[in-house]
Amino acid sequence: MNAPVVVEGLTKTYYDESRGEIRAVDGIHFTCNEGEVFGLLGANGAGKTTTLRMLSTILTPTSGFASLLGHDVVKDPQGVRKNLGFFSASTALYPRLTARETIEFFTRINQYPADLVKERVDTLVERFGISKYADVRVEKLSTGMKQKVSIARTVAHNPQILIFDEPTVGLDVLNALEVQETIKELRNEGKTIIFATHIMSEAERLCNRIAIIHGGRILTCDTLDGLRAATGQRYLEDIFVHFVKGQG
Amino acid sequence: MNGDILKLLYVHELKMLVRARRTVVMAVVIPAVIMPIMLFSAKYVHDQRERSISQTTYKYAVTGSMADRIRSLIAKAKTRVDAERDDSTEPLRTFKFSESVVSDPAAGLEAREIQFYVQTYTGAEADALPNPHADDDKDARQPKRLAGVPLVRVVFRGNNDSSNTSSRRMQNLLKTAQRLDSQQILVERGFQGDPQNLFAVDAESVATPAQVTGSNVGRFLTLFLVMLMLTGGSIAAIDIIAGEKERGTIETLLTTAAGRTEIVTAKQMAICSVALIITLIQAANFFVYVRLKLVELPANFALDVPTGTVITLLLLFIPLAATIGAVLLMISAYAKSYKEAQMYFFPVYLTSLVPALAAVLPGLSLRSAIVVVPLANVSVAVREIMMNRPDPPMIVVTFIVMTFTATMLMRASARMLSREDIIVPAQGEPELFLGGPVLFQKRVMRWFAVMWALIFAVAVNVPQLSTFRRQLMFNEFVVFAGASVLMLFVYRLNLRETLALRPVKWPVWIAVAIAAPFGNLMGIAIFKLLNFVIPVPQEAIQQMAAIMPKDVPLWQLYIYLGLIPGVIEELAFRGMLLHGLRRRIRPVLLPLVVGVVFGLFHFSLFRIGPTGFLGILLTVIALLTGSVFPGIVLHILNNSFAVFASSRDWPIASLEPWHYAAATLIFAMAMWIIYRNRTPYPLK
Amino acid sequence: MNWNDIRVLYFRELKSALRERSIVINSILIPIILYPLLFWLMYTGFTFVSGQTSELDSRIVLVNFPAQHEELRRDLANDRRIKIVASPDPLPDLHRARIDAIVEFAPEGQGNFRTKIAYDESRDQSAQARTSVEQKIAAYRQRFLQLTASRLGVSREEFQSFWVESQNVSTERQMGQFVLGLLLPIMLMVMLALGGFYPAVDATAGERENSTWETMMTVGTSRTNIVMAKYLYVATMSAMAALLNVTAMTFSMRTVLAPLGGQIGNMSFQIPLRSLPVIALGVVLMALFIAAGMMTLASFARNFKEGQSMVSPFYLIIILPVSFLQTPGLEFSTRMALIPVVNVTMMFREAITGVFHWPLIALTVAVEIVCVGIALKLATTILGNEDVVTGSYQGSFGKFFKERLMKRNA
């Protein structure tokens, strides 16, 4: 159990008065290794977001176990969040804070050593190239600029594990590419990254290993080459269709 | 709880609020600007009215055979009053009137040519008049006109302000004239001394001006504060959660290392701060206006607030602010968007003002049941403190009750905030598309609320329903039965399941037969117990006695009060309502909720307790037997027993305590039989 | 303008409003349930308090009671709300609220006496005690005088001299209308403004927030038709909310007042039928005016919240003057008929009390029609500006004014 992220039999069910129990996530297993990008590939409503929300302790799992760096998501959510950067389309920024204030706020709130905060903020502003508009309120920034600030705040407290839930939704090609580059850089720094997407090309380009999730279950989990070998298909899109259709 | 994180979040929340220009404008600037406008206009309108009253010369006419004598008496009284310097006759001195000559005063009054007229009758004429008050001789000791005494009648139009005011003043003047006249007669016949000075009364108040001012200010202080806290706080509260949800920043915040408790606490602290700050700003505002003479203070206005009082008041205002903050936070957390939060705010606002009005009602002391009513207790306590007449033990109780309320509400709002369906964007309401039984469960409470409002508002307003029989028919058949049939139809419900039309084991019937008369006695016992806490005013007892109509034959009473309500109310409450709520409320609480709703349908404060209690028992029986039938029979028998007892004048309401205890015991035995023969209600 | 298109669009707006939970709750459910609930709460509170205080006696201490006036003492003792108590040191007891009044007698010779009542003005109960004692003494005095009179040979009739009473020629119905006339017009105005508020913001800023605004702008009908349909929809919602709220309020008010009895209880709260057309006319005019004003302001906003803060000032401008018209003495005058909003309020009041000053009504209608015309013209001019429709100016009227209108003039 040395892997930074361990997920065993994680399940989330909603109770709906009319339809009874709905299993959004149905007993999934996987582990992620240090310095790898683990791809979670699935269509809309496949259970990706629910899984990631459970990992980030926003939702409580119905059953099963998950731990990040040894912190149990149920028993020690605080410990999990301290070591986690979570980024998704629905994690917005405070419009009335400036870029620098945003980064500083998230550095502090994630309990980064107080005496190092200033230094850390300067580093991040430098690194993501936001120094030009660091003191402008977020509401005035363009989408691409906001994206950069958003990533900066995700990594503000230098977490070991990063979760990206469809980070490129709504971005143009250039901005999306920039996000992908950043993710690569972060991987090269030795971070563990979980990356959920429904865009095949992104998964192909970024992920070391890919799990295909459908109907709340993980259908397969392997490296891209492994998947190619198992299905005999060249393109991830075909591989995906192969598994999903095969599942019925 | 991590103090540093809490501080960081709290400062963050305040910063966000201050930076929202519109929020600041709406919460602080607009009220600050509006208040002087309001005060100024109120003063202007008031002055205008005063001036027009004092400047207007009211026109009137005097007619009848005694006109001349009355004219001279009026003139004499006016001269006498003008010579006095007494405060009580001040309005009479400023009163200007002139008699005008009108041929037909009644027509003149109708045409607004005169404000009122004085009709005079000689004693003989007055004796010949039909006496409109002959039949309602309520108080024989009230002074009456003696036969043969002349009559002076001031005729006015009540639906006209100036006619109202001027005629009342003329009445007072005439009464003064009458007093002077009879005193003069006495003196003429040899009365020793001045009758004016006989048994004179001087009243002197021992209250300091500060106490009087405190009493007047304290009456409205809490109401005013609650209004300010709610309006100002709501803007902040809505921005702080509903706004955050709408902007999508709540999820960002939830993935940070800050715990949910810290997040919620910081938000609550921020709202309370805003509520307190707004209160302070408005108070400061008020003092500025006083200095600028926008608000004129009464002559002996003396507000003396020692430090101890300030501290006590603050101690009470903190849980008050916390309670209001928590309520606002709950609305905000419950709503999915800014807009929705706004919608819910209005009714909550109006409803919260009602308990804050408690101190306005005269004579209410904190040393009563009011002490356990949140908000109302603060309202009364604040007034007593402002009067410099604090009641320390009761203030402690108030503080405990408020702190408890605030804690419970804060916990509820914290729980609401961590509800997952609030964080996760709503997936719509699938029930809306499905309709049918599932939608019924969501809507059943709404139906009963509308039914409640209908019964409350319609019966009195439709004159055709004013008789006992018609009103009962309307309530039972149109509202209860009608709505039930409509619900069955609209939501396509299964008749047998919904109304719990199931057979029961035979011993249950024996138990029901035993229980019937004793349930009624238990209801009376509950009423008597509650009476210790909530005394029943005399009028209410008379009203309740009037429920039993006198002109309806006895056999019909059994039908109207026994059979019809027994069948229809059971089907509505233990059928429809219980079925609708069975999955939405925990089984333990189910009887309580159904019982309380049943009690609320009896409207009168003093009937809610006993009827609610019977409602709980009936629900328990329905849950134990899985059937509505035992309840129907018990309900019919219970009501019929009451009719029977009252027809025989049985003193069932004034038995010895042990009689009631015995009744309870027998009822419990019957319940035990039912329990042993239970066929539980299907809850799933 | 194509009325057929407008009709289609109008019904779409209405339908979607009736399907929106918040609008349904706000405009329909709340009036039906909230007012009965509020009045019931107040009534319950009232009975609760009267129950609490009905047991409270006026506790009084008599000091130096003159023995020859024993009858007065009997009068006091016989009243079941007055309790004569003994206290060795009454003043501190009065301060501590253990007693409610100290009645001290001082003989003045010839059987006369003077009374000093010490009480506590700040306590309702004590003030009540004072009044009761004063009444008792006054009644005793009257009896005493009468006795003296008959001893002096004055008959009771002679002594009474004459009798004063009053007679109100207004019927209970007229009285009810008088009270309604003070309350209802203001409530109507508040509810008209409140009822138009959400639909106005929803139909403009709300659409922009949901990005349906652009969809609407691309449909195959003219922009004027769209605006017109929205406008009529807002006016409809405003009028509907006003009528529903006020009806619910009148109904529940009666339920609460009826059991109270006495002068208020006997009032009959019925609006004369012939005043309904005038009220309806006023409601329609006001709804049209309010809808035009609110929509114009709300159309600058980019989202609901902005829309709300844009419309709030307009709302206040309407409500504030109206709230001072409660003064009973005000009369509908020509000067008042010239002031928009105020004139309709006064028109409502007169109509409810059954008074119709046709020239003033005509003047009011004319003034309001001009106002609606101006507001509509303004609305179409502003909405005709492309940059407003696409949501520039950051939801600020000031900015629009500065950048657009000023520039054009320059």
Image (cartoon, rainbow, N blue to C red):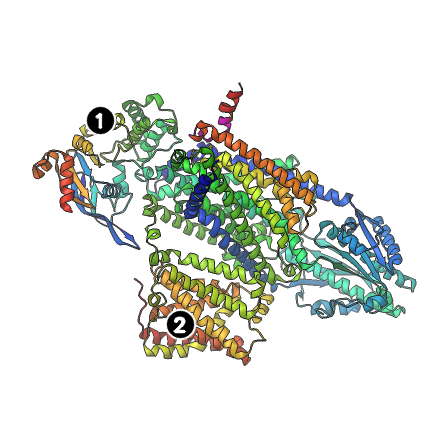
Q: In this view of the protein, can residue B31 be seen by the observer?
A: yes
C393 is within the stretch colored magenta: yes
Place of residue C393 in the rendered image (x, y in percent of width and height, measured from the top left): 45, 27
Distance from Cα at disc 2 to Cα at disc 1 = 72 Å
Query: Residue at horizontal 47%, vertical 78%?
Result: B659
Residue furthest out toward the top: C410
Q: Quadrant of the N terminus of chain B?
A: top left
Place of residue B339 in the rendered image (x, y in percent of width and height, measured from the top left): 43, 42
User: In the structure shown, which secondary structural element does the residue marked by tag 2 occupy?
Assistant: helix
Identify the amino acid type marked 2. Gly
Place of residue B582 in the rendered image (x, y in percent of width and height, measured from the top left): 35, 61
Disc 2: host chain: B
Vertical position of residue A228 compared to residue B612: above or below: above
Mark 2 neighbour class, 10 Å CA radius: few under 14, some 14 to 19, many 20 or more: many
Circle 1 is placed at which residue position?
Answer: A181
Query: Residue at horizontal 73%, vertical 44%?
Result: B50
Circle 2 is placed at which residue position?
Answer: B631
User: In the structure shown, which secondary structural element does the residue marked by tag 1 occupy?
Assistant: helix
Identify the amino acid type marked 1. Glu
Q: Which residues are magenta?
A: C390-400
